[in-house]
Amino acid sequence: MRILIHYHRTLCVDKSFFGGVIVKKNLKILLIFLFVSGCDGIGVDKLKQSSMSFFKSNDSSQFEVLQNYNNEIKKQTIQQLLAGAEAKVNIEGSFGESLKSAVEKDPGVITISRELLAMKASVDVTKSQKEFQVSGTLYGGIEDVSDNSKGIAMVLSANRLIFDGGALDAQIATQNFSVKSKEYALRAKIDERLMELASIWVELERYETLNKKIEDRVGVLGPLISKLEQVAEAGLGDVRQVAAAQRTVTKIQVTQADIAEKFEAAKVNFVNSFGSLPQGQRFDHELVLRLMPEVVTKEMANQAAAIQMRYADYMAAEANLQSVLVRDGIKLGFESRVTRPFGASTRDSDESIGFALRKTLFNGKKNISEIEQAKAQIDANIAKLNSSYREGVRVIKNAQQNVSSMKEAVELARKNAQIASDEIVYLRKQLVIGGSTLDSVLSAEARLYEAEANEINFEAEKRKSELSILNGLSLLGPAIGIAYEMN
């Protein structure tokens, strides 16, 4: 009957070469402890106390950090976790500074940036497989109760990969291309969010302007509306003309209520994204116009973040195929194993050092299936690249066409507004001498607001299309100082 305390631990190696191994402090302490303990009689209590003090001494700070982290996680409630959910953006700066602050604090952007850091760390983990791997196992306790033999034994193992046909390098290349893809995914997310934030700003100014326009128009129409109410109450004038004027007034009031509601919704959306309403800052259309390219070339479209992300995915798939092709090839490694018993341990002392050659002889056609899967993934990523390119070009071309159309529409709306304004002046003069009706004046005022509203709406749509072009070409972020690799 045996009662053993079994502790296994992997140790880190700072530097290695063929003739020897230089290890960290905890391995040196282990060796000192084992040799010292071999000179004395070993009791179970002493064994327990000494072994536990060794395994905790070198990494006590790490244990404390982990424990403190676990305690912090347990103490957090959902209210605490959501304390920073609301947008807290520095809206006191310029248009570009406000956009930059908002996108850097966006939860979606932060999520991808943290995922990128995790992927970079995983590459380092894979690279570490090229270095010496040293593990230690400590056995201690009563090895045989009937013979009352007790002792401890240490087993140290070390190995290092020497040659694997490039399988590990291909795996690292796959991970590096995946990291590159994630970097472009972060950039694409930032560009997309910048477009959304700037569009939210456009919508706020659109309905703010429309609301002010209709309030001003209703203010001008106030005396006419009062006069209409007086005529209606007195029963004077043509009933049909009075009814028509009342319908026109009602239509204006409905439009006013609709615009007021949309203005409030635009303010809510802005506060949700920026934390507060702008204090005098305006949408910087001059910045957008400076960034707009005169001609969009194929090379410019190819440099878009979404396209580069898909290309990195393709390269990762190619590297993965290379990894699969050599995965079951010959592997050569250096291996060493040392077993040392101490005290009255009945284990045998053993040392071995040399090379190990490995080759998979049969795996049930697993490798063939993996190769087919890797090739299919390459084809899929090529299709995704082509699809992203087509979609990107389509969006840019549609946006360019919309910008051109909206420019013409804005000019037409301005002409219509001027015509309506001149018509109102004439009708008001005619109303005084009885040459026009109250309904004709009110209708002309409504047409003037409609023409002015069309100009405002067309301009807003043009600006949103311009933002779509900048997003498709990844031009806005660098212009306002965005750091795409966020920490």
Image (cartoon, rainbow, N blue to C red):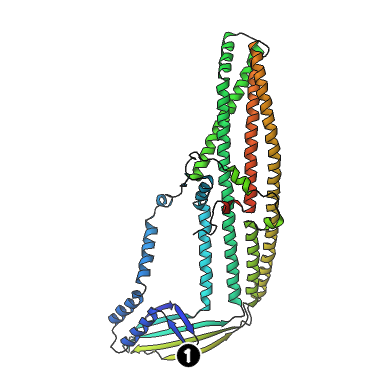
Q: Is residue 94 left or right of residue 433?
A: left
44 vs 191: above or below: below
Q: Could you say where residue 367 lies in the image, as x and y percent from the top left? A: 65, 75
Residue 37: give x, y in percent of width and height.
31, 86
Q: Is residue 484 above or below residue 48?
A: above
What is the number of callouts on the image? 1
In the rendering, at what x and y percent does residue 330 appear? 61, 83
The residue identified by callout 1 is 352
154 displayed left or right of 485: left
Query: Image quarter for residue 417?
Result: top right
User: Residue at 50% of width from left, 67% of height from top?
Assistant: 121
Element on which disc 1 rests? strand
Foreground residue, 139 or 75? 75
Q: Nearer the viewer, residue 387 or 215?
A: 215
Q: What type is the residue that disc 1 sits on?
A: Ser
Residue in front for this viewpoint, 257 or 454 = 454
Seen in the picture, residue 462 relative to 391 is either above or below; the reply is above
Q: Is residue 53 visible?
A: yes
**Looking at the picture, does residue 282 appear above or below residue 174?**
above
**Label 1: how many residues lie within 10 Å, few (<14), some (14-19) or many (20+)?**
few
Residue shown at the point (58%, 72%) measured from the top left = 172
Q: Is residue 388 visible?
A: no
The one nearer the camera, 480 or 350, is 480
Quadrant containing the N terminus in the rendered view = bottom left
Residue 297 lies, in percent from the top left, at 71, 54
